[in-house]
Amino acid sequence: MFSEISGEEFAAAIDACAAELLWEAGVVEPPIDALDVAEGLQLIVTRDYAMPYRGRFVRLAEQNGEGGGLGTIVVGTAERPEREQWAVAHEIGESVAYRVFERLGVAFDESLPTAREQVANRLANAILLPRRWFAREGRECGWDLLALKERFSTASHELIARRMLDMRPGIVVTVCDHGRITWRRSNVTARPPSLLAEERAAWQLCRRTGLTADEFIDAQSGLERVRAWAVHEPEWKREILRSEIAEL
């Protein structure tokens, strides 16, 4: 569906649509509360804790049987606030995904459900972490994950780290859970190499102490700086690494 559209064009359409939504909702600065965005867009949010999934978008019929009905987001059980925020943002994305298709010149009615889901996912990220504000705040704090979490408190640490991949400079982001790597991606190459010794050392130090590890390393390794942040909870140990790729 999007095979003929460049990644840059797709990302630009997502970010432009998200910025448009936030403007329409009257949101002028972070942190972004997805519930406020929904209200600003005149979408109703209701809860159904018996629902087996986090959220869905429905259009309720008007009482008089006329018109398209009210846009309603039904939210299920969420284990933590950030997950509910993302669920609501995702359903907002579902409700306006057609705008992205229009920007890209793709027929929405002919699109596959998987393509619509992809757009809704990307819109959710861009709503909670708008490019203009996120890029500015990231540069100002030197892309410190904990500082960005304070500013964009409704987004999870992992979502913030993944959003860094949509920005520059070139980096690798690694997520580790309970002592093993569960996710590793780069915005420079589709297949980043395995952890370098310097990355592993920073990760293990962070995992052992629960403190941020920050190492500047020899650029000959291909990296300039490695940081590891601990996101430790009583029953869950996660570390997130940001490895900055050396400029040649």
Image (cartoon, rainbow, N blue to C red):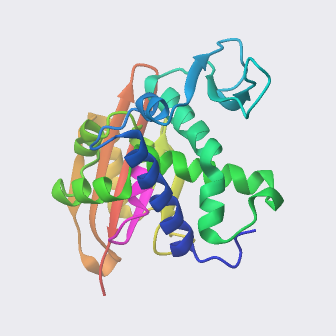
Residue 165 is inside the magenta segment: yes
Q: Is residue 67 above or below residue 136?
A: above
Give the side of residue 233 with respect to residue 30, left or right.
Answer: right
| Residue 93 image position (x, y, % from top left) | 58, 45
Residue 34 is inside the magenta segment: no
Q: Which residues are magenta?
A: 161-173
The C terminus: image quadrant:
bottom left
Q: Is residue 56 above or below residue 224?
A: above
Q: Residue at x 52, y 38 (%)?
A: 89
Q: Residue at x 69, y 49 (%)?
A: 117
Q: Residue at x 56, y 33 (%)?
A: 87
Total numbered labels: 0
| Residue 230 image position (x, y, % from top left) | 33, 38
Give the side of residue 13 with respect to residue 212, left or right.
Answer: right
| Residue 157 image position (x, y, % from top left) | 39, 40
Q: Residue at x 16, y 57 (%)?
A: 140
Q: Is residue 84 above or below residue 196?
A: above
Q: Is residue 153 visible?
A: yes
| Residue 193 image position (x, y, % from top left) | 50, 69
The N terminus: image quadrant:
bottom right
Q: Is residue 200 visible?
A: no
Q: Quadrant of residue 207?
A: top left
Give the side of residue 60 with respect to residue 71, left or right.
Answer: right
Q: Quadrant of residue 31?
A: top left
